[in-house]
Amino acid sequence: MRLMAAVMGCVGLLSASLGAQAPAPTDRSRATLFTSADLKAALGALATDRPSAAVRVFSLDPYNVAVEQRQPRPQGAAAHADRAELFYVIEGSGTMLTGGAITDGKENGPNTQGTTISGGTRLAFNPGDFIMVPSGVPHQFVDLAGPVRVMSMYLPNAR
């Protein structure tokens, strides 16, 4: 039984990391555990050949929790009009640039994405730090000293 669960977990992580299919929504009828071994496996499955990669950990509508890996190369800038984003730094250090304006922003639904932010405030971060980015605020990972791993959670605006 444990072997089957491990195999299914690996298949699920592989599918999520390849973008083949999002994980099933978290079961609302019972508590769900995501162990440190699950986290290690999820982080190990993330691609390192691109600026960022993520795998979803939990999906409990309207919330999503993911683990992301950011490489020390240029990262895109983003702003989300419909939700805040909470980050918890698992490993690595760097700077998050927040505020200002996305100079080459392109809107895609409630999201604005681009390559750089002009102006803004630089927030240096280290393992164990939390970063809360309110909805509509541009943000971008910059000056990464090495690979950075974060937990991210989208927090939809109150209705």
Image (cartoon, grey):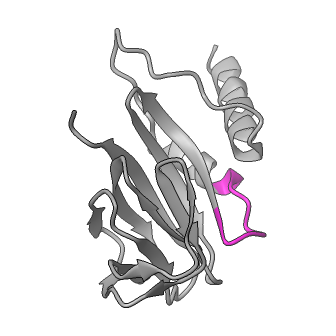
User: Residue 16 in the image: x percent, y percent?
Assistant: 68, 39
Image quarter in which the N terminus is found: top right
The residue that appears at 36% across and 14% down in the rendered structure is 28
Quadrant in the picture for residue 87: bottom left
Q: Is residue 52 left or right of residue 128?
A: right
Q: Is residue 22 above or below residue 74?
A: above
Q: Is residue 32 above or below residue 77?
A: above
Q: Nearer the viewer, residue 19 or 57?
A: 19
Q: Work out whether residue 21 can be spotted.
A: yes
User: Residue 134 in the image: x percent, y percent?
Assistant: 27, 60
Extreme left residue here?
158
| 91 falls in the magenta region | no
User: Residue 111 in the image: x percent, y percent?
Assistant: 50, 55
Q: Work out whether residue 92 can be spotted.
A: no
Q: Is residue 79 left or right of residue 145?
A: left
Q: Is residue 82 left or right of residue 34?
A: left
Quadrant in the picture for residue 62: top left
The residue that appears at 21% across and 38% down in the rendered structure is 158
Q: Is residue 140 above or below residue 38?
A: below
Figure disc tally: 0
Q: Which residues are magenta?
A: 44-52
The residue that appears at 55% across and 71% down in the rendered structure is 105
The residue that appears at 49% across and 47% down in the rendered structure is 66
| 50 falls in the magenta region | yes
Q: Nearer the viewer, residue 158 or 105?
A: 105
Extreme top residue here?
29
Image quarter in which the C terminus is found: top left
Q: Principal SS element in the magenta part?
A: loop
